[in-house]
Every structure is written in C-alpha cells, then in structure tokens.
Amino acid sequence: MPKQPKKKRPRSARGKPVDPSLRRTAEHEAVAGVRERQHIGHLAAGRMPPGAPMVVTNGGRVIDEAIRDATPPMTEDEKLLGFTPPHNDDFTRTDPWRVMRIMGEVIEGFDKLAKVEKGVSFFGSARTAPDDPQYLMAVRTAQILAEQGFSIITGAGPGIMEAANKGARAGGGHSVGCNIELPFEQGANPYVDTLIDFRYFFVRKTMFIKYSIGYVIFPGGFGTLDELFEALTLIQTGKISQFPVVLFGRHYWAGLLRWIQSRMLTEKKIAPGDLDLMVVTDDPSEAADVIAAGWRAQVEAASNLARSAWAEQVDRMEREAKRLAELARRGI
C-alpha cells in the first residue's frame, strides 16, 4: 500500500501552524496590542492613559495585564457577535432588548451630530507621537479644512485622531470625537468639542459615513484599513457619490497600492477606474483642496437633482392643467 503523503497543517500569515490555541493567543495579543498603541499615544502626548496600569517587561515591551485576566470585560459588540450556545427562547430573552439599545444609539448619534456641517473624517494610528511628521501634517490638514468651514470628525483617541481634533480647534472649526467601547478604558483626547460614546462598531461606522463628505486617511493599522475599504466599497456600489478619499503619506501607502494594481487589477477583481477613487498626497494643502472640490461637486450634484425634480414636477403640473383645460373645453 503506497505511503500516504503527510497532510500539511494550515499556517498563519507569519508561517506558524494554525490551531485554536494559537488563534486564541493571537487574539489576546491583538487586543493587548491595541491597548498598547492607545497607551503609547496618550503617553506621547504627555498625559496619563486611562484604565489599568501597563507593565513593561525586561524586553521593553509594554504588556496589558488586565487583558490576560480569566474573565475580561465583555463589550456590547462581543455580546452581539460572539458565539453562544443556542437556546429556544434566546430571541425572546435578549435580542429584542439589544435591538432597542442599537436603535437608541443610532438615534443619539443622529441627534448629537445633526448640526455637523461639511464633516471630514480623519483616520490613522493611535500611537503617532506629537513630534512625528505625520502628526504635524494631520494637524495642518485639519486646520486648513477647519478654516474653510469644515467640521473634523475622528475616533476621539490619541495619535492621528488627536492631531486632527487639535487642528480643528486651531482652525476655529467644530471638533467631533466618536469614541468606541473597547475591552479596556479608552479616554478621549482633550481637543474634542462634541464627544459621543458608541457601544457598536457598525453604528459608529454609520455615523462616520453619514456625517462626512470625505475621508483623509493617514498611516494606520487594521482599523484604518477597515474604514478605507468600507468607503471604497460604498462608492463602488453606488451608495455614496462624489466622496473624496485621500491617502496621506505616499511612502506608507505605496506597497498597498502596488499590490492592488499587480494583483486585484491584473486578475480583474476590480476595474481600472477603481484606482481613481483614491488620491495620494504628502501635501496638506493638496489634501484640503481635494476635499473642498469633492464638497463642491456634491453640492452641484444635489442642486442638479433638485432642479431636475422641480422641472419634472412643473412638467407634470402643466400636463395636468392641459388635460383639465381640454376636459372643460369639451364640457365634460
């Protein structure tokens, strides 16, 4: 009997054999890493981060001991999305109440952000220090936009988010922070004028899109990429239009854009024109000009749509008047 070839085990992107214990360890480390980046961002800005203290190991790595507790706090997103053993009465016991809470969070977001005018959302790494060139560029870009009457919206955290809120305040504009519940305490930066706390990521993401006329995306991690590709998907599927997406930092984004061209485009996973949905720059003024041009295009499109609807209504009224006149002439 021929010898069966040894079955290869699946491996992670780093080449490690995959099993549930590795995945769980990686998940714990990922959550700890997010808190570490938030922690570093607050420290770099010269303030003490909120929540439990961080422990620095001999190797210099910052470890969040609270993340490794046997029963870490559960966020509302985790309760909603996580696996639970099925119960016949589970829907009647929990889900309707959760839907009510989601509805309440949506209503609160709409209410608090209703007066936001010409919002521009900034995304990027939470660990970017105030002396980093990207931080300074984010401050300047947000300041230019604020001086032109745009509101600045961020995730309320440190790093690039703080830089954008700081720039908004420097430019005399409205500074908005959309905070999210995480498994650890996340404090808002001190440059936020209007702060909203969200339990659910998808509600928060809806607010970013609904109250923004464009995105400025600085170097960041998975969360930054999530917001980038969500916006591109909504544009690609016609859900939003004339929505400028600015990638700030040519060097940082070059590798991703090369991969999109060499793989996604070459293998026809996207159309050539999809690459034109993004603008790449290193210049705050250029980024602001792209956003302003997008806003003007949105206003013009809305005006054209309103004129078209009005013209159609007038035409319909004229046809009805002619019909009634013809009926009167006939004595009907």
Image: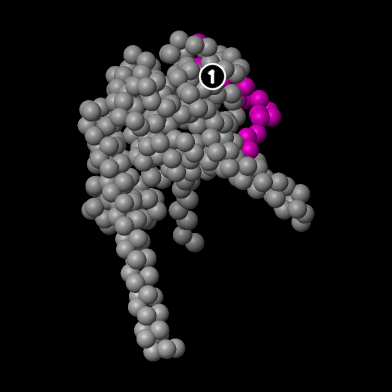
Percent x, y of residue 201: 53, 39
- Give coordinates of residue 226: x percent, y percent: 42, 40
Image coords of residue 141 (percent x, y):
30, 26
Amino acid type at image mark 1: Ile
On screen, residue 48 versus residue 218, left or right, reads right
Residue at x 35% of width, y 78% of height: 322
Q: Is residue 155 visible?
A: yes
User: Label 1's element?
Assistant: strand
**Image quadrant where one finds the C terminus:** bottom left
Q: With respect to residue 196, does 65 lie above or below? A: above
Question: Is residue 267 magenta-colored?
Answer: no
Q: Nearer the viewer, residue 306 or 182?
A: 306
Q: Which residues are magenta?
A: 57-77
Figure check: 112 above or below 332? above
Q: Residue drawn 37% across and 75% down?
A: 321
In the displayed structure image, the side of residue 179 where residue 317 appears, left or right: left
Residue assigned mark 1:
63
How many residues crowd around disc 1 within 10 Å: few (fewer than 14), some, or many (20 or more)? some
Rendered view: 61 above or below 1: above
Residue 185 or residue 152, whichever sits in front: 152
Where does the image place residue 268, in percent across and percent down from the top left? 27, 57
Point 47% across, 23% down: residue: 192
Q: What residue sits 31% from the left and 47% below the top?
A: 298
